[in-house]
Image: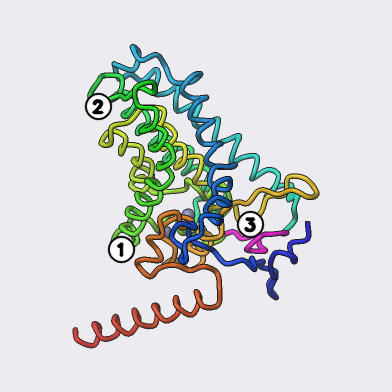
Amino acid sequence: MDDLQFGTRNKRGDWAPNAHLEVAPFWLRPFSILRVLRWVPEYLFPWNAFHMATALLYWFYVVPDVEVMKTLSWGWALWLYVVNAAAIFVMYGSVELFWYVRRKQGTRFKYNAKFPSEQPSDVFWFKSQNIDNFLRSFFISIPLWTLVEVLFLHAFAAGYVPWLSWSDNPWYLAALVLLAPAIHEVHFFAIHRLIHTPLLYKWVHSVHHNSVNPSPWSSLSMHPVEGFLYHAVAFWHLIIPSNPIIAMFQLHIAGFGAVNGHIGFDKLEVTEGTAIDSHAYAHYLHHKYFEVNYGGDGLIPLDKWFGYWHDGSKEGDAMMQARFEKKKARMNAKAART
Ligand SMILES: [Zn+2]
Ligand SMILES: [Zn+2]
């Protein structure tokens, strides 16, 4: 596909989309029902449908019997870890293999023309972004993902929290499924903004931001505090009356969905003429500029409401620069006072 029909490339070879990021259409005024209807398929497919499919696969083929989960034990916890790690290895690994190692698409639709493997840096373990990100994912974040999973499954199985059945509550549970991506955005925005406060940034979140030019393995490359808080989004289903399948869906939006922001390509070409939208641009801009787009794609546009939104346009850039100038002035004034 010709990526220059969809965007522009600068002198350095970095590609940027022509279309600017837009918040979900029900927030736009004047309200247009047609715009909302056009957006629904894109909301469901392919990503949310994929996360639901993996949640169901887990529920029917991976998750142990309820009787087993009534007792916490290493056996089923390790089993879940192995499946999670294998699934991430296959899913993230295939994007890595085809788009980053074999480079089947070259730099078409790639925001940053450079590949992380070409840029060794001292900030990473073994000076390699790939090795560092890979080790942190498999030995820190995926174990914490599994910990969250084991705890909520045990809570449901042991009867500590209500377990609503699909036959008695079909409409309520269906609504909760549709809301899960919104819960994810609000939770992610809240914890992410929190770990961008100066102390926590330095201590916790800088680990994730070492990858200024993210690739699939960067997705779950986190400090343990972040790795736990990020996956703990599934615990909302212990507070809201829910069902373990929806909690699993919520967890998969976080775990498997983390790759979306870190794919590095705007579109993944599948055949000559077809491509999947990665939805990576908002979070790519976050990795590039740090203090913009703390949330997701604008499903719940908290970034817009708090003034952090960067939609990729010149105006978005000007707003960000103005905010940075103000912040600098505030910090200089504070320094002068002390
Ligand atoms: Zn990130
Ligand atoms: Zn961040």
The residue pinned by badge 1 equals: 197
Is 37 placed left or right of 81 in the picture?
right
Q: Earlier in the sequence, mark 2 or mark 3?
A: 2
Magenta-drawn stretch contains 114: yes
Q: CA distance from mark 2 to mark 1?
A: 33 Å
The one of 288 and 176 positioned closer to us in this rendering: 176
Q: Where, quadrant-wise, is the C terminus in this rendering? A: bottom left
Name of the residue lying farthest toward the left? 338
Badge 3: residue crowd in 10 Å (few <14, some 14–19, many ≥20): many
> Residue type at mark 1?
Thr
The residue pinned by badge 2 equals: 161
Q: State the residue at coordinates (40%, 48%).
A: 182
The residue pinned by badge 3 equals: 266
Tell me the magenta residue range.
Answer: 108-121
Q: State the residue at coordinates (30%, 39%).
A: 236
Determine whether 287 is above or below 160 in the image: below
Residue 226 position, x and y percent, is 36, 48
Q: CA distance from mark 1 to mark 3?
A: 29 Å
- Magenta: predominant secondary structure element? loop
Q: Earlier in the sequence, mark 1 or mark 3?
A: 1
> Residue type at mark 3?
Asp
Q: State the residue at coordinates (43%, 45%).
A: 181
Query: Which is in the foreground here, disc 1 or disc 3?
Result: 3
